[in-house]
Image (cartoon, rainbow, N blue to C red):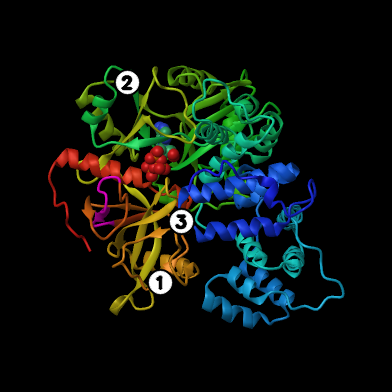
Amino acid sequence: KKKPASFDPSSVVCWEKDKPVPFLFLCLAFDMINEESGRIVITDIVCNLLRTVIHATPEDLVPVVYLSANRIAPAHEGLELGIGDASIIKALAEACGRTEQQIKIQYKEKGDLGLVAKASRSSQSMMRKPDALTIRKVFKTFHLIAKESGKDSQEKKKNHIKSLLVAATDCEPLYIIRLLQTKLRIGYAEQTLLTALGQAAVYTEEHSKPPPEIQSPFEEAAKIVKKVYSVLPDYDKIVSALLKDGVWELPKKCDFTPGVPVGPMLSKATKGVSEILNKFQDVEFTCEYKYDGERAQIHFLENGSVEIYSRNAERNTGKFPDVVTAVSRLKKTSVTSFILDCELVAYDRTKQRILPFQVLSTRARKNVALSDIKVDVCVFAFDLLYLNGQALLQENLKIRREHLYTSFDEESGFFQFATSTTSNDVEEIQKFLDKAIDASCEGLIIKTLHEDATYEPSKRSLNWLKLKKDYMENIGDSLDLVPIGAFHGRGKRTGVYGAFLLACYDNDNEEFQSICKIGTGFKEEVLEERSTSLRSKVIPKPKAYYKCGESINPDVWFDASEVWEVKAADLTISPVYRAAVGIVDSNKGISLRFPRLVRVRPDKAPEQASSSEQVAEMYNAQKHNHNDKQDDNEDD
Ligand code: ATP
């Protein structure tokens, strides 16, 4: 289908202009998306949805965008619905005049409480039929649910859910429940929403004229919205600026703001020192230890408040009160505000050494009191994005680092600058890598210092290259993959899953593509843990956006929910698995040989798993290195 340039938003407006948008309008769009698998068509549907809202009731664009993203607020605000299945089941039972037991039985059959809700429909008799749901009402109720706290909060949350379900018709109950569970998962991700928002903005009448230098306005507008979102992930601000000044003015109106975390810059994998030297020929670069802990972006504002954000922009301040104290104490007095990019690493202060990531992961997640801390943490600082009211993103790393070094005092075991060296000698870099490994680091990150050395938010950049210790032995880097199915265990493994089907994520098509089965290398307790955790994620059939290959038939399918870090011996072309299909070979995918689980990555969402593009890059790099191997092997 072509872009619907001739689409007339007024022709589908089924509500009075400037009156609240019916919730059903959004739900029917979700239904349409659910039926589609083509990226362009889905983007068109979302674009038309947004155009229609802009045309008729622009005031509702913010809630429409949030609900379409299955969010209720920006991640950094930490506003969570906090609802368990139990409250939903209770609300459903009461709204539909059924028992909880009946709901639970049906839930088991259907594997999706949304589908149970849709099938149940309200059977409560009422004197007066409730008014039709509007997007505003649903969004407002979600906020009320999130803000309920303290005694009776679960009961109050349940009553809010019930009030929505009682008024819901058609497919609305399905989406109310899925939105509440943050499991909309109808086969599109936030990137499509951002593209559609950019395209919809081009169509709006007042601001439709692009500057003369812009050749492809729709593409350009999508790029602008995505870029702006990477530095300011806040739909309230972006949507109001779009409506007020149009998409071409957006970069001027929505910029990096302290207090709102930017997407972290990421690195690309490499196969060895010589590849790095080839890539960074003639440019100045630095090698830093790659610490194995938790990424943190620390915001210190003029008013003295400190917030710590995770790699996913979630507020982590309550987990690290010791880090809040350390950075406040060790910043120089001349420093009034900053944003620091760093790795938080478990540290033994007596023996003065770094502890493994697994030790860090034993720390409690919320409301930690300083007196309860058993695992100490050292901040390893490697970048400074903002200092005393000035954004530094556009400065090169050399300058950012000078600011970093002069803004803080180091204190061993509390706050240290990432260890680094500058050299372009293969042997020296190799020795530095060995030193990093001896110091319990994962390897090195090599960064451009001067040219092409700005901070690139949310980007896996070629200007940051990672070099891990085992690059010689296997494929250079581990992969982050999503379990989407499993096979029942037999013999000793009866009662747990015996093997899992893993997938990578294709960003262009927004689909999970199968890459391998994994069944060996699990410790018994890990297998038990993963099986228990995934058992609650079983779905009756694979999602339309799982691409698996016809001959792969796991016993159960899972909702994509976890990310596992996996190492493998190598990558091979496969006629069965679908990873990166169409990139390296038009019909065949790529699969992993001898995969083994390293750890679970709770800091990554399924859509942040290794991308098909990365898998293809790794395959090509390996091919380049070995220039042989058993292509066309089937590893099953
Ligand atoms: P990995 O699984 O290797 O951590 P990733 O996908 O999380 O991969 P990468 O881009 O591969 O991210 O590696 C960058 C990560 O390494 C950062 O997110 C950060 O947490 C960590 N890190 C440790 N030391 C550094 C450093 N000196 N500079 C930048 N990042 C570092």
Can the viewer see residue 351? no
Image x and y of residue 595, in percent? 27, 56
Q: Earlier in the sequence, mark 3 or mark 2?
A: 3
For the residue marked with disc 1, what is the amino acid?
Val
Which of the numbered marks, if any, corresponds to residue 422? 2
Q: Secondary structure at mark 3?
A: loop
Label located before the other in sequence (2 or 1) = 2
> Residue type at mark 3?
Ser
- Per the rendering, the mark at residue 556 is 1
Of tags 3 and 2, the one toward the viewer is 3
Residue 447: say if magenta. Answer: no
User: Contact, CB < 8 Å: mark 2 with mark 1?
Assistant: no
**Of residues 608 and 134, which is closer to you in this image?**
134
Mark sitting earlier along the chain (3/1): 3
Q: CA distance from mark 3 to mark 2?
A: 48 Å
> Which residues, given as a range, are shown in magenta?
583-595
Q: Which residue is mark 3?
A: 37
Classify 396 as above or below 136.
above
